[in-house]
Amino acid sequence: MAAQVTTSTDSILRQPILGSRRFSNMLWASVSAIGGIGFLLAGLSSYFHQNFLLVSDPSDIQFIPQGAALTFYGVAGTLLSAYLWFVFFLNVGGGYNEFNKETGKVTIFRYGFVGKNRIINFQYSLKDILSIRAEIKEGLNPRRVLYLRVKNRGDIPLNRVGEPIPLAELENQGAELARFLTIPLEGL
């Protein structure tokens, strides 16, 4: 996992957000591609009675029902892999949070899927920021999120989606942000 590097000067704090360009996404996309293509070639080998694989000879398998099932799982695995690679290259969820005292603005920038809402860019005035709120839920599905509380806008999540960040890192990020903006930190 890549470490999050916060760029800070006296008047600008910029936090990069890791999106879908993670090692785990690349690993699962590769594994599903290899598995999907293998199943697809095994299913096609059973249909055409010709070996398309290097490691085994599935041409003797009956196409109905085994070959058809192999082909179905091969197509499903290949489509899943294509989707994962597509999301990986688009870097969905990636972006940055920028807190700029010079301009008096907070910018929340994220990349989305292809379309008219590909770029998500929210800007708020620093005067409208009420506090930083930390939400910590432990258990089977833990949740550790920092929220930016904005007047008349509700809570806006600040960290990446996916596996929860360590508690110490969440506390450090929240404290650094609250100290930089001179606003209270709630929830810890």
Image: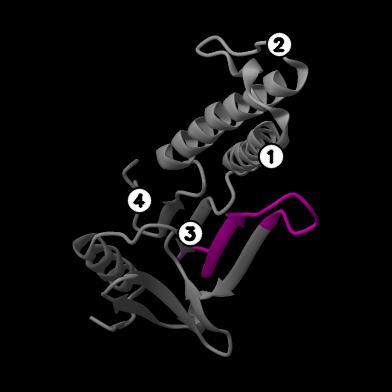
Q: In this figure, which residue is indicated by the disc labeled 1?
A: 72
First of labels 4, 3 by sequence position: 4
Q: Residues within 10 Å of mark 2 (few under 14, many from 20)?
A: some
Q: CA distance from mark 1 to mark 2?
A: 18 Å
The quarter of the displayed image where residue 158 is located = bottom left
Say which of 187 and 104 sits in front. Answer: 187
Residue 29 position, x and y percent, is 53, 36
Residue 50 lies in quadrant: top right
Q: What span is in magenta?
A: 101-119
Please name the amino acid that badge 1 sits on: Phe
Q: Distance from label 3 to label 1 (Cα)?
A: 46 Å
Q: Residue at x 30, y 69 (%)?
A: 174
Q: On the image, numbered disc 4 is attached to which residue?
A: 6
Quadrant, the N terminus: top left
Dot 3: within a 10 Å radius of its alpha carbon, few (fewer than 14), some, or many (20 or more) residues?
Answer: many
Measure the alpha-carbon separation of dots 1 and 4: 46 Å
Q: Which mark is residue 137?
A: none
Q: In the image, which is nearer the foreground, mark 2 or mark 3?
A: 2
For the residues carrying marks 2 and 4, which lies nearer the camera in this image?
A: 2
Q: Amino acid at mark 2?
A: Gln
In the displayed structure, would residue 94 be above or below residue 101? Answer: above
Counting residues from the start of the chain, the first of labels 1 and 4 encountered is: 4
**Residue shown at the point (47%, 62%) measured from the top left:** 100
Location of residue 81 in the rendering, given as x and y in whole percent from the top left corner:
60, 37
Identify the secondary structure beneath mark 4.
Answer: loop
Q: Which mark is residue 98?
A: 3
Question: Does the segment drawn in magenta span residue 109?
Answer: yes
